[in-house]
Image (tube, rainbow, N blue to C red):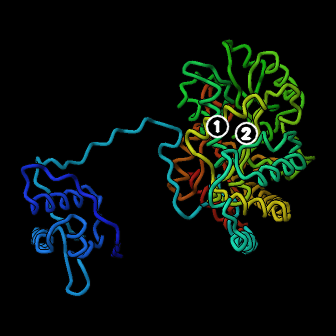
C-alpha cells in the first residue's frame, strides 16, 4: 500500500483541564486516527517536531507514540519513521466514536445507472477523446505558461477572462447566429452550473416552469432544487408544443427548451414553432432558457441558428458548453444573458464561486483565437457523421425487428425505438446485463408516457468496430 508522507502539523483538540499531557496527546491522536483524519499509511512527524509543536518534552512525545504503537494504532521502523497502521484495532462497542447512519438518497433519474471508467457502447455523454488534438492543446498551454502574467494568477472578473468572453462572442455570432456583446457572457463550468444559477434567479418555491416532456433531467433537478412547480409540456415533430403549454394554464416564470437538438428525441424546433414561442414569451413576460448542447455537430441540411438570434425582446438566455465540444475534464461553458439579468446572474455566481480559473480560460481563448477550435469542430463533424452512418447501417443488420434507430441531423447520440414489445426500462436492464451502456426513454418522461418507447444510443466515442460489437451484444440482449 502506498504511504502518505505528511510534513504537515497535526491539529488536536484543546487539552481538557483534568487530563495529563500524556493522556491528552494519546487520546487526541487516537481519535484523529479513528475519525479518519489521519488515514492508514500516513506518516507522522518525528517525535522531536511533535514535541516542539505542542510545547512538551521529547520524552512525553516518545511515551505517547510508544503507547499508540503498543495499542496497534501506529507502526514504526527504525531509521525510517512512524506511520498510522493499515490494520487498525476495532474501537470498543458503545464508545463515543460511532459511524453515523447515512440518510438514504431520494429516488432520481440516475438511480440504478452505473458508469464504469472505461466507456462502453453506447455511452451518451462522451466525445471521441482519442481524436482530441492533445498535442496542440499542450503546445498552446505551454506557450501560455511561458508568458504567464501575475494578473492571470490573481484571478479576475466573476464573468470570466475578458479576452475569452470576446472570443466566445465572436464564435457564437459566426457559428450559431447569437447576437450579444462580451459583457452579456458569463463563463461557467458548464450548462449545469448555468441552469443551477438561473433556477435560483428566475423562480422561487411554487413558481411554474415549462419543461419539455420528455426532457433533460439535469434541468429538472436544477428547478426541483429551487422548489419550482414543473409543468411537463409535450413535444411533437416540431418541438415543444406551445399550445399544449398554454392549455395547461398557470402563471409561468420561465421555459426550458433544447431547440437545436431536442433532448432526448433529437428533432430540431421548426421556425414556425420558434416564432410562436418567442411571441408568447414576449407577451407573457416569460424568460426562455435555450440549452444549445452539441448543436455544432450537424450532419445534414443548413445550420440551424440559435433561438437567441431570433429574439427581439431580450427574453432568451442562451447556454452552451465546451465540455463535449472539446473534453469533459475542461469544465467550461457559458451563459449569454439579456442585459436585465446579467448583473443579478453575476451576483449569484459570485456568492458560490468568485471566479473560474483564469489560466485555463486563457488557454481556451488562445485555442479559439488561433483557429484550432474551428478545425477541431470540422474534423469531428465528419468523424461523427461517419460513426452515425455505421450505427444506422449496423442497426439495420443486427437489430431488425428489435430496435429501429432514428436518423438525426445533429448531435452525439440518437434514439432507437423498440419494436420487440419491451418497455424501455426492461430493455435498459437487459442491455446492462449484456454490458451495453444505454439509457431508457422512461428516465426522461415526466407526464404522459411517450408514444413510442426506446433507448438512447451514443455513437461519438466509438469506432466502427466498437459500434458493431456493441450492436451485436445489444441484439442478443433485446432478443432474450
Asked if 218 appears above or below 316 in the picture, the reply is below
Marker disc for residue 195? 1
* Count of number-bearing discs: 2
Q: Which residue is mark 2?
A: 291
Q: Nearer the viewer, residue 361 or 246?
A: 361
| Farthest bottom residue in view | 79
Q: CA distance from mark 2 to mark 1?
A: 9 Å
- Residue at left offset 79%, top offset 36%: 259
Residue 129: x and y, percent?
68, 65
- Could you say which disc has been placed on residue 143 in the image? none
Vertical side of 73 occupied by 182: above or below:
above
Q: Is residue 122 visible?
A: no
Q: Residue at x 61, y 32 (%)?
A: 445
Q: Residues within 10 Å of mark 1 (few under 14, many from 20)?
A: many
Badge 2 density bin: few <14, some 14–19, many ≥20, Cα 10 Å: many
Answer yes or no: do the residues labelled 2 and 1 have beta carbons within 8 Å? yes
Residue 166, position as x, y percentages in the image: 82, 50
Q: Is residue 378 above or below residue 307?
A: below
Image coords of residue 480 (percent x, y): 54, 51
Q: Secondary structure at mark 2?
A: strand
Taking 396 as reference, is 435 left or right? left
Classify mark 1: helix, strand or loop.
Answer: helix
Residue at 60 percent across and 40 percent down: it is 350
Image-based side of 237 in relation to 61, left or right? right
Quadrant where the N terminus is found in the figure: bottom left
The quarter of the picture where residue 441 lies is: top right
The numbered mark, 2 or 1, whose residue comes first in the sequence reads: 1
Amino acid at each position: 500500500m502506498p504511504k502518505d508522507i505528511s510534513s504537515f502539523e497535526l491539529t488536536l483538540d484543546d487539552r481538557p483541564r483534568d487530563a495529563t499531557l500524556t493522556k491528552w496527546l494519546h487520546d487526541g491522536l487516537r481519535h484523529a486516527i479513528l475519525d479518519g483524519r489521519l488515514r492508514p499509511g500516513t506518516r507522522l512527524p518525528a517525535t522531536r517536531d511533535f514535541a516542539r509543536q505542542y510545547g512538551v518534552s521529547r520524552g512525553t512525545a516518545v511515551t505517547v507514540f510508544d503507547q499508540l504503537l503498543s495499542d496497534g494504532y501506529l507502526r514504526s521502523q527504525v531509521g525510517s519513521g512512524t506511520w498510522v497502521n493499515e490494520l487498525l484495532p476495532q474501537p470498543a462497542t458503545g464508545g463515543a466514536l460511532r459511524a453515523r447512519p447515512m440518510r438514504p438518497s431520494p429516488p432520481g433519474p440516475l438511480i440504478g445507472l452505473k458508469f464504469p471508467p472505461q466507456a462502453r457502447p453506447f455511452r451518451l455523454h462522451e466525445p471521441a477523446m482519442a481524436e482530441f488534438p492533445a498535442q496542440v492543446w499542450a503546445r498552446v498551454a505551454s506557450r501560455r505558461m511561458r508568458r504567464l502574467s501575475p494578473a492571470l494568477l490573481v484571478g479576475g472578473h466573476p464573468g470570466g477572462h475578458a479576452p475569452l468572453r470576446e472570443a466566445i462572442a465572436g464564435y457564437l455570432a459566426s457559428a450559431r447566429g447569437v447576437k450579444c456583446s462580451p459583457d452579456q457572457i458569463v463563463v461557467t463550468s458548464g450548462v449545469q452550473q448555468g441552469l443551477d444559477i438561473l433556477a435560483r434567479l428566475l423562480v422561487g418555491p411554487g413558481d411554474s416552469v415549462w419543461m419539455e416532456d420528455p426532457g433533460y433531467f439535469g434541468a429538472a433537478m436544477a428547478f426541483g432544487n429551487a422548489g419550482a412547480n414543473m409543468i411537463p409540456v409535450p413535444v411533437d415533430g416540431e418541438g415543444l408544443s406551445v399550445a399544449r403549454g398554454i392549455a395547461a394554464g398557470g402563471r409561468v416564470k420561465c421555459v426550458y427548451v433544447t431547440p437545436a437538438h431536442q433532448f432526448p428525441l433529437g428533432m430540431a424546433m421548426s421556425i414556425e414553432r420558434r416564432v410562436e414561442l418567442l411571441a408568447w414569451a414576449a407577451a407573457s413576460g416569460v424568460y426562455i432558457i435555450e440549452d444549445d448542447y452539441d448543436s455544432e455537430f450537424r450532419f445534414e441540411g443548413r445550420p440551424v441558428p440559435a433561438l437567441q438570434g431570433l429574439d427581439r425582446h431580450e427574453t432568451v438566455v442562451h447556454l452552451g458548453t465546451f465540455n463535449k465540444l472539446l473534453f469533459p475534464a475542461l469544465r467550461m461553458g457559458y451563459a449569454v444573458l439579456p442585459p436585465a439579468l446579467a448583473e443579478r446572474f453575476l451576483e449569484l455566481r459570485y456568492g458560490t464561486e468568485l471566479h473560474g480559473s483564469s489560466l485555463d480560460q486563457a488557454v481556451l481563448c488562445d485555442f479559439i483565437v488561433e483557429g484550432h477550435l474551428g478545425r477541431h469542430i470540422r474534423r469531428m463533424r465528419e468523424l461523427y457523421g461517419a460513426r452515425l452512418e455505421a450505427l444506422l447501417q449496423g442497426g439495420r443488420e443486427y437489430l431488425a425487428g428489435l430496435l429501429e434507430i432514428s436518423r438525426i441531423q445533429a448531435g452525439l447520440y440518437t434514439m432507437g425505438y423498440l419494436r420487440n414489445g419491451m418497455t424501455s426500462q426492461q430493455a435498459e436492464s437487459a442491455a446492462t446485463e449484456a454490458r451495453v451502456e444505454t439509457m431508457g426513454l422512461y428516465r426522461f418522461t415526466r407526464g404522459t408516457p411517450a408514444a413510442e418507447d426506446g433507448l438512447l444510443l451514443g455513437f461519438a466515442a466509438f469506432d466502427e468496430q466498437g459500434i458493431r460489437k456493441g450492436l451485436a451484444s445489444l441484439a442478443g440482449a433485446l432478443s432474450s
